[in-house]
Image: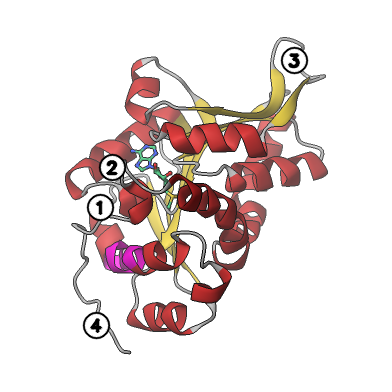
Amino acid sequence: MFTPLSQRQAHLIEKMDATNADSEQLEQTYADFYTLNRWVSQWNRVYTKYVRPHAIEIQKQGKIFQVLDVGCGGGDIAFFLFQWLKKDGISAHITGIDIDNRAIVWAKANRSVQPETALVNKNKPTGLFFECISTTELAHRGHKVDLVMNNHVLHHIPSTEITPFLTECAELGTKVICNDIERSSLAYSLFSLCLFPLRFRSSFIYQDGRTSLKKSFRENELDTLSSEGWKVERLFPFRLLLIYEGEHGHA
Ligand SMILES: C[S@@+](CC[C@H](N)C(=O)[O-])C[C@H]1O[C@@H](n2cnc3c(N)ncnc32)[C@H](O)[C@@H]1O
């Protein structure tokens, strides 16, 4: 059962990314992300340590906290963030973007939140929105937000496109948080051995999870990708954060 994962297998492709993926399994995958992310992604910790303090600073300036969730998939992380911010009394405008329109159609149907007009700025609605658009297009338009975040996206990006992708994220956000799995043989064995094939039998989660564990990064590999303004942080168990807090620089 031990699978050595010393080398990143960046060439592998997840089933969900295939243009001819079975639509029922794909939609179930977007739905299952909700459960999977609650179990493994640790956004509650990231929210407390990084997102909420930043959001409070923005709120103190009398502004609506603007967030871009890049590669939002089914929109569950954007949805969690919106709920947590609302519970903390913080007005937020969160947009989930994805280059795959199938994800956006699903997220709009299942995770949208009615826009409200925020008291702090009557022209700017708070709420959760979804759009099929790339970071490249948004960066060209000069779009700016307070936080760009992504979850389980870095390992989906082709190796040659990662540095431009991170550069665009840093142009778009004053802060960037990339949260991804850490490649590890132990994580792969645990994921393979536990009940995931039963719990996620109608979606691509089990097969794509194993592929993702082969494609994801180790700490030193993310260190190599990052430059001034970026830092890498490990989160127990098997998570890596790549964080940008610089001045619209380059990865
Ligand atoms: C594993 S899914 C993660 C979905 C979601 N973030 C979550 O954690 O539930 C990866 C998503 O990233 C999207 N994606 C891949 N490359 C992207 C890019 N360059 N820009 C935006 N989205 C991208 C894919 O279409 C897919 O929906």
The residue located at (39%, 14%) in the rendering is 141
Mark 3 and mark 4: span between their CA atoms? 53 Å
The answer to which of marks 3 and 4 sits earlier in the sequence is: 4
To which residue does mark 2 refer? 251
To which residue does mark 1 refer? 225
| Ligand 1: quadrant of the figure | top left
Point out the stretch of residues depicted in magenta.
211-220
The residue located at (31%, 46%) in the rendering is 18
**Label 4 crowd (10 A; few <14 / some 14-19 / many >=20):** few
Q: Give the numbered dot on residue 164.
A: none
Asked whether the residues under the numbered discs 3 and 4 touch, taking CB atoms below 8 Å apart as contact, a structural biologist would say: no
Discs 3/4, front: 4
Mark 2 and mark 3: span between their CA atoms? 33 Å
The answer to which of marks 1 and 2 sits earlier in the sequence is: 1
Horizontal and vertical percent position of residue 182: 38, 68
Q: Quadrant of residue 228?
A: top left
Q: Amino acid at mark 1?
A: Leu
To which residue does mark 3 refer? 121
The answer to which of marks 4 and 2 sits earlier in the sequence is: 4
To which residue does mark 4 refer? 4
Principal SS element in the magenta part?
helix
Is label 2 within 8 A of ligand 1 (CB to nearest ligand atom)?
Answer: no
Asked whether the residues under the numbered discs 4 and 2 touch, taking CB atoms below 8 Å apart as contact, a structural biologist would say: no
Q: Is residue 35 left or right of residue 218?
A: right
Q: Secondary structure at mark 3?
A: loop
The answer to which of marks 2 and 3 sits earlier in the sequence is: 3
The answer to which of marks 4 and 1 sits earlier in the sequence is: 4
Mark 4 and mark 1: span between their CA atoms? 23 Å
